[in-house]
């Protein structure tokens, strides 16, 4: 089990967690609350543009932990696959502009494309943009998603699959993201976290509600679900990861609440249940 958390020096919050806030509102509120890091979602970056967003980030004093998201490589046509690669290069450029060292990849899936084919398209897509990432000084992190998303969001559904892709890519600019929401159920998780080792580039937390009312937008606050977050954090830290702990919660319920109160609740849950 991981050691208790005593401060917010490793706390990062995704802008999607406080979705109603603009990038500027989120940055100001996080910094005022003593949160150390921020992960920027591209939909929050878009209204400002990467250059202005970069200024907002630098002025905030927050550490930009990553940019979400790239990926979505599989497609039924070569033209669509090329467009995905172009968009990922754009994401890499945006990350560099705002000072994010990492782009998290939601790798994509398409109904009708067999999963093995989709996975090969993902490997090919990442390989094609890795030179651009290296030139920009931005790493790419493969995030496995829960199998319930294997039809249309990601053909990468276990950490073992993500680790295998990193091995196939053979680049120090590619790694993996461990998200407890997507991986908590996996009997091989501890072993695969150990295998990932230094290739773990980011660590995301929230909780699994029972019952889950919406497969995408009903994640729980840390401590209100069935995930043993401290245990998984312990595995990740024993594997060598000592970076930010990122709170990423998609919740229609939370988005409808007062976001300042939600921020304080996140901080309490982070101290008590992570």
Image (cartoon, helix red, strand yellow):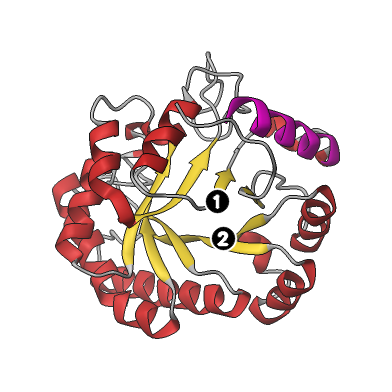
Residue 171 located left or right of residue 148: left
Quadrant for the C terminus in the image: top right
Task: Name the residue: 79% across, 73% down.
Answer: 59
Task: Name the residue: 37% across, 69% down.
Answer: 84
Highlighted magenta segment, given as a residue range: 260-274
Q: Is residue 19 above or below residue 94?
A: above
| Element under disc 2 | strand
Q: Earlier in the sequence, mark 1 or mark 2?
A: 2
Asked whether residue 269 is drawn in magenta, I would say yes
Asked whether residue 173 is drawn in magenta, I would say no
Q: Are marks 1 and 2 in contact (CB under 8 Å)?
A: yes
The image quadrant of residue 186 is: top left
- Determine the residue located farthest toward the bottom in the rendered image: 135
Question: In front of the other: label 1 or label 2?
Answer: 1
Residue 225 at what x, y percent from top left?
55, 18
Circle on res. 52: none
Circle on res. 244: 1
Neighbor class of circle 1 (other Cα within 10 Å; few <14, some 14-19, many 20+) is many
Q: Is residue 267 above or below residue 13?
A: above
Q: Nearer the viewer, residue 274 or 92?
A: 274
Q: CA distance from mark 1 to mark 2?
A: 7 Å
Quadrant for the N terminus in the image: top left
Residue 247 located left or right of residue 171: right
Q: Nearer the viewer, residue 85 or 10?
A: 10
Residue 271 at what x, y percent from top left?
67, 31
Neighbor class of circle 2 (other Cα within 10 Å; few <14, some 14-19, many 20+) is many
Circle on res. 65: 2
Residue 105 at what x, y percent from top left?
40, 58
| Element under disc 1 | loop
Task: Name the residue: 45% across, 35% down.
Answer: 233
The image quadrant of residue 250 is: top right
Residue 149 located left or right of residue 211: left
């Amino acid at each position: 089990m991981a050691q208790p958390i005593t401060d917010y020096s490793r706390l990062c919050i995704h802008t999607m967690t406080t979705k109603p806030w603009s990038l500027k509102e989120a940055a100001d509120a996080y910094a005022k609350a003593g949160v150390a890091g921020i992960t920027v979602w591209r939909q929050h970056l878009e209204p400002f543009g990467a250059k202005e967003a970069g200024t907002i980030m630098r002025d905030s004093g927050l550490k930009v932990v990553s940019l979400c998201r790239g990926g979505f490589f599989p497609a039924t046509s070569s033209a669509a696959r090329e467009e995905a690669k172009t968009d990922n290069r754009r994401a890499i450029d945006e990350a560099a502009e705002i000072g994010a060292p990492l782009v998290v990849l939601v790798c994509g899936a398409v109904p009708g494309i067999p999963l093995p084919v989709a996975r090969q398209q993902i490997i090919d897509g990442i390989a094609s943009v890795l030179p651009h990432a290296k030139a920009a000084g931005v790493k790419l992190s493969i995030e496995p998603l829960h199998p319930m998303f294997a039809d249309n969001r990601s053909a990468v559904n276990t950490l073992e699959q993500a680790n295998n892709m990193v091995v196939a890519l053979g680049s120090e600019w590619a790694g993996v993201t461990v998200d407890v929401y997507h991986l908590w159920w996996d009997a091989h998780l501890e072993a695969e976290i150990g295998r990932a080792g230094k290739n773990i580039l980011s660590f995301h937390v929230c909780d699994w509600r029972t019952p889950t009312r919406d497969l995408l937008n009903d994640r729980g606050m840390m401590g209100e679900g069935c995930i043993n977050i401290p245990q998984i954090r312990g595995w990740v830290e024993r594997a060598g990861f000592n970076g930010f702990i990122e709170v990423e919660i998609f919740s229609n319920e939370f988005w409808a609440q007062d976001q300042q109160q939600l921020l304080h609740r996140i901080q309490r849950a982070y101290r008590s249940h992570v």
